[in-house]
Structures are given as C-alpha cells and as structure tokens.
Amino acid sequence: MSETSLFTEDILTAARTKAQSIIDEAQAELERATQEAKASISKEAADIVRNAQAEAEAIKRRQTSEARHLSKLHEQQEKNSILMEVLDRTKKRIIDATKNETIYVPYLTSQIANGIRELGYDTAIVHLNATDLKGINRANIEKDAGKHLSKSVKVEWANEPIEAIGGAVISSSDGKTRIVNTLDQKFEALESTLLIEAGKSLFGK
Amino acid sequence: MSGIEAVKVIVDAEKEAARILAEAQSKASQIRKSIDSRIQEERQRTLDGAKKEASAIVQHAEDEGKVEAANVTKDSGKNVQELVTKASAHKNAAVDKLVNVILQENK
C-alpha cells in the first residue's frame, strides 16, 4: 500500500471513530435522560396507585359505614314503632281505666285533692270532662278529697266540661290559679319518663 | 501516482471524512430530538399501566365494600328481628308498667 493510501485510510478511520463517538454520546444522552425520566414517571405512577389504594379504603369504609348507618336507622325505626305502639296501648288502657270506677274514682279523687293542696286554699273550682260530670258521684269525691287532705274542703264543680280523657283541672275561686291534673297533661308531662321506662322493659336498657 | 494525483486522493478522503462526520452529527441530532418523544411515550405507557392498576384497585374495593355492606345489612336485619321478637314478648309488661307510672304519679 502506498503512503498516500495509508494516509487517506487514517483520515477515514479517524472520521469514522469520531462519528461513532458523536453518535454514542447522543445515544448515552438519550439513555440518561430516559432513565432520569423513568424515576420521576415511576414516582408519578406510584402516586396514582397509592391514591387509588387510599380511595379504595375510603370507598370500602364509606360503603360499610353507610350500611351500618342504615341498619342503625332501621333498628331505631323498629324500636320507635314498638315504643309508639306501647304508648298507644297504654293510652287506650288508661281510657279503659277511666271507665272502671274502682280504679278511676280513687285516682280522680287523689288528683283533685293534690290540686287543692297545691292551690293552698280550702275552696276550689274543679273542672271535669263531660263523662265525669255526668257519671261521677261528686259529693263522695269531695268528701274523700277532704279525707286525703285531712281537712274539710269546699269544692265548686264547674258546669262547663273540659276536653280531656280524664282527671281534673282545679282552679282557685277567682280563676287566676289553675292546677292541671288531667290524664292528657300527665301523658304529656311524663312522655320522656314513659319512653325511658318502656325502653327498659322492652329493650333492657 | 503523481503528486497531483496524490493530492486529489487526499482531498477526496477528507471530503468523505467530512461527509461521515456530518452524517454522524445529523444522526446525533435526530437522537437528541427523539428524547422528548421517547420520554413522553415512556410516561404514557407507565401512567396508562398505573391508571389501569388504580382502576382495578378501586373496582375491587367497590366489590368488596358491597359484599361487606350486604353482610352488615344481613347481620343487622337478623339482630333487629331478634330485638323485635324479644321486645314484642315484653309489650304487655311495658304497658302495665306505664299505666302504673301514670296512675301512681302524684297519687
């Protein structure tokens, strides 16, 4: 091989080596950038999966929590329904009791006596419902109320009947003070106690 | 080979060397230009995979949650039924007690 040929071969070899180095450098740059990006992309992907896991836990918690809430609501509705039925039956039993003189008359007498005691006067006006105004022996009640109070009392019976299932409204002679001892008022005043007592009997709490 | 011929051969070789280098520069430039799209493709592929995985995780949780919720409802229904049965057996006693509370109050 001539010297010229050797020289040109050297020129071309150097060019090819340099060319390969230029390409290798670009390739390495590509690999480096891709690897760096992969780390960040992997982190982004891991975040997506982690968020999904957190969302999944929340979904499960929400679904079971909703089911528990609805179940609790259903339980409460059933309890309320039983409680209301018991209150309703109690009211009916009380209405029935007002028709039984043996039970009702002593009760009415004690309510009237209590009302007079609360008023603090020896004279009182007593208001009854229409049934009691007609059917009750008022003279006996007045006498028995006096026995309750261990003193003689003067009862004036109001002619106008009150709207009540039973019991009485006792008022002062001037009508300024009124003691409401009706069964309706008892029901209203004792409602929370009745619910608690019914709850204890029915549900053991 | 004459001197002139030798110079011509060397000039041609240098031209070829320059062409080789220019070609390499062009190829390197194309490689660098492809970096963004390559990263974008990689990102798209990886995130698509992650989104699929995430979707499967959520779907699985929804299915599991439905089963758990159904179990809770079923168990609770059974408990409520027992509670109603027990309470029903005590209704009469409860009514007696409440009647007594009302009639005995302030007696």
Image (cartoon, coloured by chain):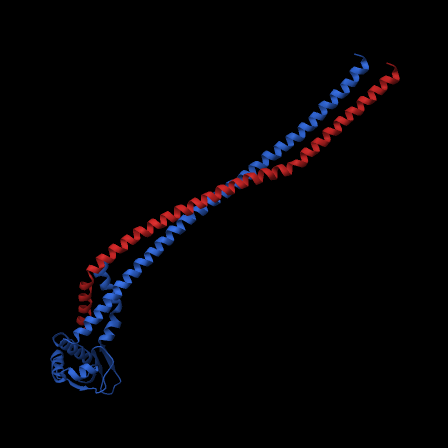
Chain colours: A blue, B red
**B8 versus B54 height, above or below:** above
Name the foreground residue: A128 vs B40: B40
Q: Position of residue A28 (x, y in %)?
A: 64, 30
**A21 versus A37 height, above or below:** above
The quadrant in which the C terminus of chain B is found is bottom left
Question: In which quadrant of the rendered view does residue A42 lie?
Answer: top right
Left or right: where A202 falls relative to A57:
left
Name the foreground residue: A196 vs B62: B62
Name the foreground residue: A179 vs A84: A84
Which residue occupies 36% across, 48% down? Answer: B68
Residue A31 shows in the view: yes
Which residue occupies 69% across, 31% down? Answer: B28
Q: Position of residue B53 (x, y in %)?
A: 48, 41
- Residue at the outermost top position: A1
Q: Position of residue A162 (x, y in %)?
A: 24, 82
Left or right: where A83 falls relative to B65:
left
Which residue occupies 18% across, 77% down? Answer: A111
The quadrant in which the N terminus of chain B is found is top right
Q: Position of residue A131 (x, y in %)?
A: 19, 81
